[in-house]
Image: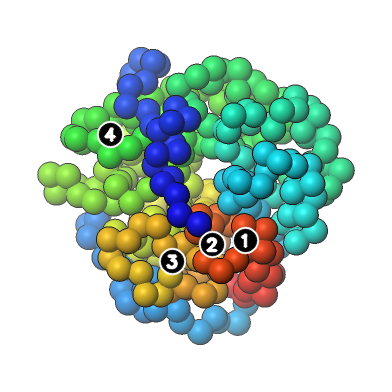
């Protein structure tokens, strides 16, 4: 299946080129030492899968429901029940045309998730529309995060600083409602502007008490960066991650190359072990491409991989 994720994000209002919220002063204490950001991925970590070390299995893992974007609208409850049967104990949502709760109220959705044994921990959402309402509804059912999934490549570092200001304000809104705000990266924040990585700008200009980050491991590897370096550079800032594999033979500019976990090039045993040591709390499967498979079958394969993975 071929699709354009960025086109989807733009058409659903998530490509936030302009933010209605005004900028606020950044918390200077959130700035970290500007260590060398030359984080090029070594071949044995991100490009070549290494033998899994002995360790323990993940006690919990979840799935980003965008993985089932074509199936969910047809039968939300049925698909969620199947995911629970595969072993997923957590779910991360996205904002489609039925809202965050798939046509149900927040409490109705929470009740159903409890019935099938899943925890709705987080959701990607449009940060430009009714954010305070979303935060109130999310907080009321015990969700942990609302997440900005995409801001798009910006022209200058100052543009990224403005987004950092906005994230701090959104974090304040979330804090008032008992949850936190996070930003989910794509590859563009790991490509330098004027000798600096935009990801550094976002992380150094946001308040750790208000803003966390979701590392999409695939999108760190894609521009040639090393997830281990970034995990170590910002301990306890990466609280969620997308566990998404990259096809072994994908070209360096091929962005639509996700694949079933364990069949690609990313060494998750090493990366997730380090992530856990650096404060990672939520491990969330996402897959965007299905070759000779279906979204549900791939979700099942991905769950089995994480059940067997030792970190």
Separation of disc 4 and disc 3 at Cα?
27 Å
First-in-chain label (4 vs 3) = 4
Separation of disc 4 and disc 1 at Cα?
37 Å
Query: Residue 279, position in %: x, y?
Result: 53, 54
For disc 4, the neighbor class at 10 Å (few under 14, some 14 to 19, many from 20) is many
Separation of disc 1 and disc 2 at Cα?
6 Å
Q: What residue sits right under mark 2 in the picture?
A: 290
Separation of disc 3 and disc 1 at Cα?
17 Å
First-in-chain label (3 vs 2) = 3
For disc 3, the neighbor class at 10 Å (few under 14, some 14 to 19, many from 20) is many
Query: Residue 166, position in %: x, y?
Result: 38, 25
Q: Any mark on residue 19, and which?
A: none
Separation of disc 3 and disc 2 at Cα?
12 Å
State yes or no: discs 1 and 2 in contact (Cβ < 8 Å): yes
Q: Any mark on residue 246, and which?
A: 3
Residue plotted at (33% across, 22% down):
18
Q: Any mark on residue 160, and which?
A: 4
Residue 68 in view (yes/no): yes
Query: Residue 99, position in %: x, y?
Result: 63, 28
Residue plotted at (83% across, 42% down):
114
Secondary element under disc 2, as helix, strand or loop, is loop
Secondary element under disc 1, as helix, strand or loop, is loop
Query: Residue 146, position in %: x, y?
Result: 56, 33
Separation of disc 4 and disc 2 at Cα?
33 Å
Which mark is nearer the camera, 4 or 3?
3
Image coloring type: rainbow
Q: Residue furthest right?
A: 115
Task: State the quadrant of the C terminus.
Answer: bottom right
Residue 163 in which image quadrant: top left
Q: What residue sits right under mark 1 in the picture?
A: 294
Residue plotted at (22% across, 60% down):
38
């Amino acid at each position: 299946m071929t699709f354009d994720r960025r086109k989807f994000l733009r058409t659903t209002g998530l490509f936030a080129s302009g933010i209605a919220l005004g900028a606020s002063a950044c918390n200077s204490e959130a700035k970290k030492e500007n260590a060398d950001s030359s984080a090029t991925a070594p071949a044995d970590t991100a490009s070549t899968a290494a033998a899994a070390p002995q360790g323990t299995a993940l006690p919990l893992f979840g799935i980003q429901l965008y993985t089932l974007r074509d199936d969910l609208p047809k039968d939300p409850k049925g698909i969620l029940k199947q995911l629970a049967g595969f072993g997923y104990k957590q779910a991360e949502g996205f904002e489609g045309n039925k809202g965050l709760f798939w046509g149900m109220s927040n409490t109705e959705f929470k009740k159903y998730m409890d019935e099938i044994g899943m925890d709705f921990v987080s959701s990607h959402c449009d940060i430009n529309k009714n954010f305070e309402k979303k935060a109130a509804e999310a907080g009321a059912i015990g969700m942990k995060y609302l997440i900005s999934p995409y801001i798009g490549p910006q022209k200058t570092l100052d543009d990224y600083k403005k987004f950092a200001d906005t994230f701090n304000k959104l974090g304040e809104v979330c804090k008032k409602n008992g949850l936190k705000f996070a930003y989910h990266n794509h590859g563009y924040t790991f490509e330098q502007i004027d000798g600096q990585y935009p990801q550094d700008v976002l992380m150094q200009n946001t308040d750790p008490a208000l803003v966390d980050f979701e590392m999409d491991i695939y999108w760190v590897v894609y521009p040639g960066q090393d997830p281990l370096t970034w995990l170590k550079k910002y301990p306890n800032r990466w609280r969620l991650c997308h566990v998404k594999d990259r096809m072994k033979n994908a070209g360096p500019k091929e962005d639509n190359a996700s694949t079933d976990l364990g069949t690609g090039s990313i060494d998750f045993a090493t990366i997730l072990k380090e992530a856990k040591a650096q404060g990672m709390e939520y491990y969330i499967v996402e897959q965007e491409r299905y070759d000779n498979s279906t979204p549900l079958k791939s979700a099942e394969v991905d769950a089995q991989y994480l059940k067997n993975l030792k970190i």
